[in-house]
Image (tube, grey):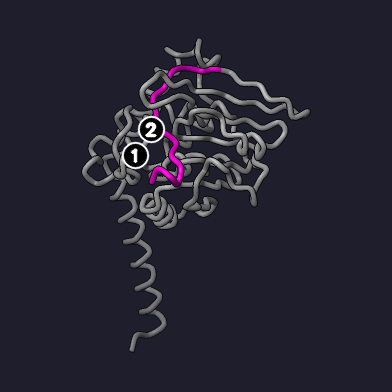
């Protein structure tokens, strides 16, 4: 039988090796993540006329520096995790280009007290980035296997302020509405009325709109304190389509 001292020593060793394992899992990726962020910042400068700003909020930059994107892509894609391009994650879906994740996050101006809704969990990466910036993230994924994998991944990585629902995101998450900010990570043919309804007065939504075979536009939706809605076209983009249950 182990003495109290021996048990305590074993626990300390366990904690040390757990920490080392976590550090080793990130070994070699920290510099790649820094280079990714530098690339994003350059692209923001190059597209500043579209974005109407020359640089990202420092809080968004810090979030991008800390979230391990390589753990949100299939193992076969790990070597490409920090390239500035979308990557396949299975089931006909992708993880968005880091630049797009960055500008979509920045344009809706997340604040620490905000409640955020994400439509299209995918791998969970966008939700993880957002979770560093807001109080709570509610994320919806219609593709059940992806939703389950993302939920497990986020729990394993200890993102405790994210809740994932496997549901049709077109109708939003009425029981948790209203939301300060909404981010849609798949292209819709139009802005879903339920999402506008669930956006809090003073809130912002970012959404790509257009069909798979035509130019899509990233739209920034603002709802003012009097519930008046205005829409600004930001820049052309390409996203996988927003699907509904009848298409599964």
Kindly identify the residue that appears in the image at 52 percent across and 43 percent down. Answer: 169
Q: Nearer the viewer, residue 9 or 64?
A: 64
In the rendered image, the residue lying farthest to the front is 246
- In x, y percent, where is residue 87? 30, 35
Q: Nearer the viewer, residue 239 or 74?
A: 239
Secondary structure category for the residue under label 1 = strand
CB under 8 Å between callouts 1 and 2? Answer: yes
- In x, y percent, where is residue 50? 50, 13
Q: Quadrant of residue 69?
A: top left
Kindly identify the residue that appears in the image at 53 percent across and 40 percent down. Answer: 170
Can residue 15 be found in the magenta stretch?
A: no
* Few, some or many residues within 10 Å of mark 2 (<14, 14–19, 20+): some
Left/right placement of residue 156 relative to residue 111 reads: left
- In x, y percent, where is residue 157? 41, 53
Q: Nearer the viewer, residue 208 or 131?
A: 208
Decide which of tag 1 and tag 2 comes sooner along the chain.
1
Kindly identify the residue that appears in the image at 33 percent across and 50 percent down. Answer: 23
Kindly report the distance in space between the C-alpha atoms of the residues bearing marks 1 and 2.
7 Å
Q: Which residue is mark 2?
A: 240
Write down the region rendered in magenta.
233-248
Q: Which residue is mark 1?
A: 93
Secondary structure category for the residue under label 2 = loop
Can residue 237 be found in the magenta stretch?
A: yes
Which quadrant of the rendered structure holds the N terminus?
bottom left
- In x, y percent, where is residue 95? 36, 37
Q: Is residue 210 above or below residue 48?
A: below
* Few, some or many residues within 10 Å of mark 1 (<14, 14–19, 20+): some
Left/right placement of residue 118 relative to residue 194 reads: left
């Amino acid at each position: 039988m182990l003495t109290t001292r021996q048990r305590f020593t074993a626990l300390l060793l366990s904690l040390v090796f757990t920490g080392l394992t976590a550090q080793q899992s990130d070994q070699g990726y920290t510099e790649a993540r820094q280079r990714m962020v530098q690339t994003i910042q350059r692209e923001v400068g190059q597209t500043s006329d579209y974005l109407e700003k020359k640089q990202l909020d420092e809080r968004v930059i810090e979030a991008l520096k800390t979230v391990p994107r390589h753990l949100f892509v299939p193992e076969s894609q790990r070597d490409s995790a920090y390239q500035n391009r979308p990557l396949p994650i299975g089931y006909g879906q992708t993880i968005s280009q880091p630049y797009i994740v960055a500008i979509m996050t920045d344009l809706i101006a997340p604040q620490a007290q905000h409640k955020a809704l994400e439509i299209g969990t995918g791998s969970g990466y966008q939700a993880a980035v957002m979770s560093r910036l807001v109080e709570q993230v509610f994320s919806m994924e219609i593709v059940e296997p992806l939703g389950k994998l993302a939920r497990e991944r986020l729990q394993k990585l200890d993102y405790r302020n994210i809740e994932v629902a496997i549901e049709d995101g077109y109708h939003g998450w009425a029981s948790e509405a209203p939301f300060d900010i909404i981010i849609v990570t798949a292209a819709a043919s139009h802005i879903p009325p339920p999402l506008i309804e669930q956006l809090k007065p003073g809130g912002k939504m970012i959404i790509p709109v257009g069909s798979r075979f035509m130019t899509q536009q990233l739209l920034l939706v603002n709802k003012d304190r009097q519930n008046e809605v205005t829409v600004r076209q930001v820049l052309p983009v390409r996203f996988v389509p927003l699907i509904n249950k009848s298409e599964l």
